[in-house]
Image (cartoon, coloured by chain):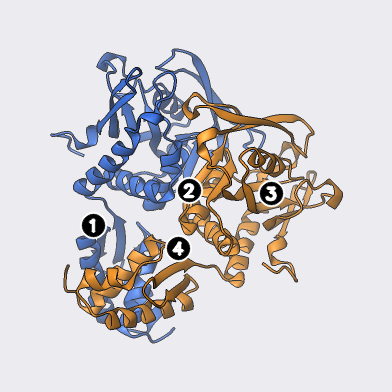
Chain colours: A orange, B blue
Amino acid sequence: MKKLKRSARLVEMTQYLLAKPHVLVPLTVFADRYASAKSSISEDLTIIKEVFETEGIGELHTLAGAAGGVKFVPKMSREGALALVNGVCRLLEQPERLLPGGYLYMSDILGQPAIMNEIGRTFASVFGDRPIDVVMTVETKGIPLAYATAAHLNIPVVIVRRDPKVTEGSSVSINYVSGSNKRIHTMTLARRALKSKANVLIVDDFMRAGGTARGMIDLLQEFEATVQGVGVLVEAGGVDEEELLVDDYVSLARLAHVDPKTREIRMAPGNYFEEGTNL
Amino acid sequence: MKKLKRSARLVEMTQYLLAKPHVLVPLTVFADRYASAKSSISEDLTIIKEVFETEGIGELHTLAGAAGGVKFVPKMSREGALALVNGVCRLLEQPERLLPGGYLYMSDILGQPAIMNEIGRTFASVFGDRPIDVVMTVETKGIPLAYATAAHLNIPVVIVRRDPKVTEGSSVSINYVSGSNKRIHTMTLARRALKSKANVLIVDDFMRAGGTARGMIDLLQEFEATVQGVGVLVEAGGVDEEELLVDDYVSLARLAHVDPKTREIRMAPGNYFEEGTNL
C-alpha cells in the first residue's frame, strides 16, 4: 500500500491496464494499491478511458456492482486497420518479393514485432466479441500473428506441427490435401495441447484455397472443439468460390494480381474491409 | 496539435513510450503533440520515470542537447527475473510433464503470451546493452521467446528453418550434429533474411549440449554475422563442460534432475543467477 499522487497513479494504472487486457480488475484493487478512495479511482479511469478511446488504443469497460470493475479491451478502428493494411500492401508490392511459383517473400514483414503487434490488435478487435479460449496456428510463419493476437486477447496459443515431435508427447495426426498443389500433407497436435470442447480462433499468414485452414478445422473435430473464427493476413485472389475449402474467414489483405514476367504485384485490402461485412 | 491537461498527457505519454521501447523520442515531439512547453513535458517525464523505476518496468533515459530526447528501455531486475523463473520452475516440476526420453512438455508454458512477454523482457534486459540488430531462433518452440525479446528491443526476428522453403527464396543450408543424439540435421536460412555483418542475439527454449545453438553460430558465419549473445530459457543439467558445444550462453533455468521412475523433476535457476556472473 502506497499513497500516490494522481499523476503517478495515472501512469501506473495506464501501464497496469495495458499489460492486462481482457482482465476484469475490481476497483478495490486500485483503491487498496494506492490507498485512495474509489471515487478518485473512478475519476482516474474516466481520464484514462478518454485518452484510450481518442488514441484508438481500445476501450475501458466499467462494470458496476459488487462483482464490478474495469476491463481494458484492445481495439483497432476500421480506419486504423485499413491504414495499417495499406502500409503492409505497399511493402508487399515490392517486385523483389516475387519468388518462383508466384509466392511472395513475407518473412521480413512477419519478422517485425511492431507490425505483428498491430495486426494482432486488429484480429483481436475483429474477433474479440466471440468466446475464444485459444488461438491456433500451424507452424511456422503464422506463429507471430497467433501470439500477437493472443496477447491482446490474453489467452494461450496452440501450435499445430507438421510432424509429431518427441517433446510434445502423444498426439493426434490427420492428413489433408493442400488446395494449391493437391498434395497430401500431415498435421499433428499434442493431445494435451487442447482441452476437449475448446473455442478456437484459427490464425494464419497466407491462404490460397484454404487447404491448411480446412486441415486445422478437421483436426479440431478430433478435439470436439468449436471454430469461432478464421483470420488470415493475406488471401490469394483469383480462387473460384467453389474451390475454396473454407467459406467463413476474415482476410486483411488480398493478393490481387501477380505478373511473373513484369514482376508486377498488386495488393488490395481483404474481405474485412468489404462493404456489408457485418463484422 | 491538441491541448491536453497534464493528467491526460501522462496517460498518453505512458502508452506512447511503452509502445516504442529503445526509440529516442525528441522532447519536441511531445511538446508539439500536446502544445505544451518543453519544461512541462520534462516534469511529466520525471513522474513517468519514477513510476517506471519503482514498478520495475524499465528506465527512461533522457539525453540533453539538440539531438536529445527520451528513450524507454525495458528492464527486469534480477529479483524480478528470479521470481519469474522460480514460478516457471515450479510449473516445470509437475510430474505429468515428463515424456519418454527424459524430455519435458513445455509447450503450454511457451504458449502463454503473458509469460513469454516477461521472459522476453528479461532477455532484453540481460542483453540490452549490446549492439544487436536482430534476434534469431530456429523453428519452432523458440519462436515466441525470440519475438518477445525482439519486441522489447524493438528489432526484427529471423527464423532459421529445418528445410528450405519455397516461400523463402534462395537460402544457405548447413548440416550440424545435435549434441544429444549425435544425429546429423540440417538448418537453413533465407539469403535475404539477414544483411551481411549483422549483430545477432540467438534465443532458444531448451539447450542440452548446445548442438542447435552451435549450428546457428556456424550458419551465421556464412553471413559474416557477429553473435552478440546466446540466451536459453532452460538448459539441461549434468552435461560435462567438455561436451558443451557453446561456451558463452545465458540460461534462465536449469533442469537439475529427472528421475524417470519416480517422475521426479527438479528445476533450478540458470547460470544468469549464479554468483559472479558479470552480466
Q: Tell me the kind of residue under disc 3.
A: Pro
Looking at the rendered structure, whether the residues under marks 4 and 1 are on a common chain is answered as: no
Looking at the rendered structure, the kind of residue marked 4 is His
Q: Earlier in the sequence, mark 4 or mark 2?
A: 4
Which of pointers 4 and 1 indicates the residue nearer the eye?
4
Please give the residue where the numbered disc 4 appears in the rendered image.
A22
Asked if the residues shown at circle 3 and circle 4 are in contact, with their CB atoms under 8 angstroms apart, the answer is no
Q: In the depicted view, which residue is nearer to us: A227 or B182?
A: A227
Reading the image, the residue beneath label 3 is A95
Q: Give me the residue at 40% from left, 17% from top.
A: B179
Disc on the earlier residue, 3 or 2: 3
Q: Chain of mark 2?
A: A
Q: What chain does mark 1 sit on?
A: B
Mark 4 vs mark 2: tell me if same chain.
yes
Protein chain holding label 4: A
Residue in the picture at 41% in, 41% down? B109
Tell me if mark 4 has few (under 14), some (14-19) or many (20+) residues whose alpha carbon lies within 10 angstroms of its own.
Answer: many
- CA distance for labels 3 and 1: 45 Å
Residue B267 on image: x %, y %: 27, 31
Q: Secondary structure at mark 4?
A: loop
Q: Are marks 4 and 2 in contact (CB under 8 Å)?
A: no
Q: Name the residue nearer the viewer: A146 or B130.
A: A146
Q: Is residue A267 left or right of residue A12?
A: right
